[in-house]
Amino acid sequence: MGLNLPSGEARAHRTGEPRVPPWLRPILRVPLEVKLLGANLIIVGIALLLMFGPFQLQPSRSTDAYIVVAALVLGATVNVWLVRLALAPLKSIEQVAKWVSQGRLGERVPTSLVADRELARLSRIINEMLDGLAADRKRIEQLAAELAYEEKRGSDASVRPSSLSDGIVRAVVNTPDEG
């Protein structure tokens, strides 16, 4: 049984996505921290080429070049570490999504001290969605229990099972207005 939703509510729109050349797609699929490391290593490589390339630096400039290369290597290391730290909340969101898909509806995304504003907001929204799903499931279970009770009781003519089951369907399909 499927719900008939207006087309705009049935799926997310993907308009405005940039067109990516086919040769660039494999590069873009590489994890972000690896891309940043690669970009930083290219910069370090250029600095090394300038130091040890086909031309010679003056002896007084070679110390400066070593300092620059060391600073670039340190910068690359810090960049990769910061990206890994910044993306850590996504791993917990992914894990919670996996658990929920396996039926563990009580799981929630933990609050992260390192999440930026957008990731923290995404985590809150996911948790609110999961709370809503849990409330809906509890409501369905309560209505099913009422239906089972009424069917078992069966003597009350004022409550017909069809009207009670219609009420359950309306309760499941209709969500509260969000004003």
Image (cartoon, rainbow, N blue to C red):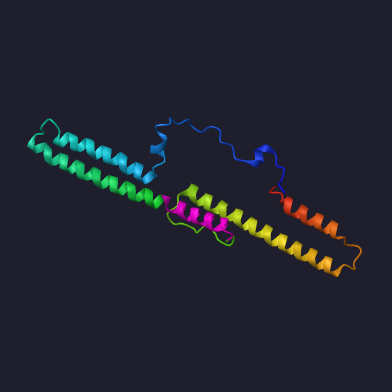
Q: Is residue 49 left or right of residue 96?
A: left
Q: Is residue 98 left or right of residue 158?
A: left
Please tell me which residue lies in front, 64 or 17: 17
Q: Is residue 47 left or right of residue 4?
A: left
Q: Main secondary structure of the magenta part?
A: helix
The x and y percentages for residue 173 are 73, 50
Q: Is residue 34 left or right of residue 171?
A: left
Q: Can you say whether 17 is above or below 86 in the image?
A: above
Is 89 colored magenta in this rendering? yes
Is 151 colored magenta in this rendering? no
* Residue in the image at 34% along x and 42% along y: 36
Please tell me which residue lies in front, 151 or 88: 151
The x and y percentages for residue 7 are 67, 37
Q: Which residues are magenta?
A: 87-103
* Residue in the image at 43% along x and 31% along y: 22
Q: Which residue in the rendered view is the most extreme toward the right?
A: 157
* Residue in the image at 41% along x and 50% along y: 86
* Residue in the image at 49% along x and 58% along y: 111
The x and y percentages for residue 77 are 29, 48
The x and y percentages for residue 102 are 56, 58
Q: Which residue in the rendered view is the most extreme toward the left?
A: 59
Q: Quadrant of residue 13?
A: top right
